[in-house]
């Protein structure tokens, strides 16, 4: 399967326009780090769970990088 270009994810009002959803597998994350992340970030701030947290954190990092690249 050919990867779609990033231009398919144009930001509208601070949110990405998603045309499909994918699954993500993350390997080699220490259990202690995952538990700490869940306890300190996900549970208190993201009622939708880890998927909601990861999407939000990814979007924030993309926006931050775009601002840095603009300079």
Image (tube, rainbow, N blue to C red):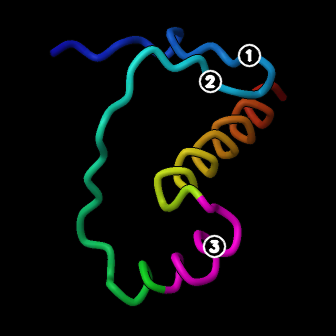
Give the tally of numbered discs. Answer: 3
Q: Name the N-terminal-most of marks 3 and 1.
A: 1
Residue at x 29%, y 58% (from the top left corner): 26
Q: Are marks 1 and 2 in contact (CB under 8 Å)?
A: yes
Label 3 sits on residue: 41
| Mark 3 vs mark 2, CA separation in Å | 22 Å
The answer to which quarter of the image holds residue 45 is: bottom right
Label 1 sits on residue: 12
The answer to which quarter of the image holds residue 40 is: bottom right
Q: Is residue 24 above or below residue 9?
A: below
Label 1 neighbour load within 10 Å: few <14, some 14-19, many 20+ = few
Which SS class for mark 3? helix
Label 2 sits on residue: 16
Q: Nearer the viewer, residue 3 or 54?
A: 54
Left-right relation of 71 to 53: right
Q: Are marks 3 and 1 in contact (CB under 8 Å)?
A: no
Q: Is residue 17 magenta?
A: no
Left-right relation of 34 to 58: left
């Amino acid at each position: 399967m050919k990867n779609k270009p990033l231009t398919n994810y144009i930001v509208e009002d601070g949110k990405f326009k998603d045309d499909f959803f994918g699954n993500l597998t993350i390997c080699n994350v220490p259990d202690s780090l995952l538990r700490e992340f869940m306890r300190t970030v996900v549970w208190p701030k993201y009622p939708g769970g880890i998927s909601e947290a990861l999407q939000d954190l990814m979007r924030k990092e993309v926006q931050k990088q775009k601002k840095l690249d603009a300079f």
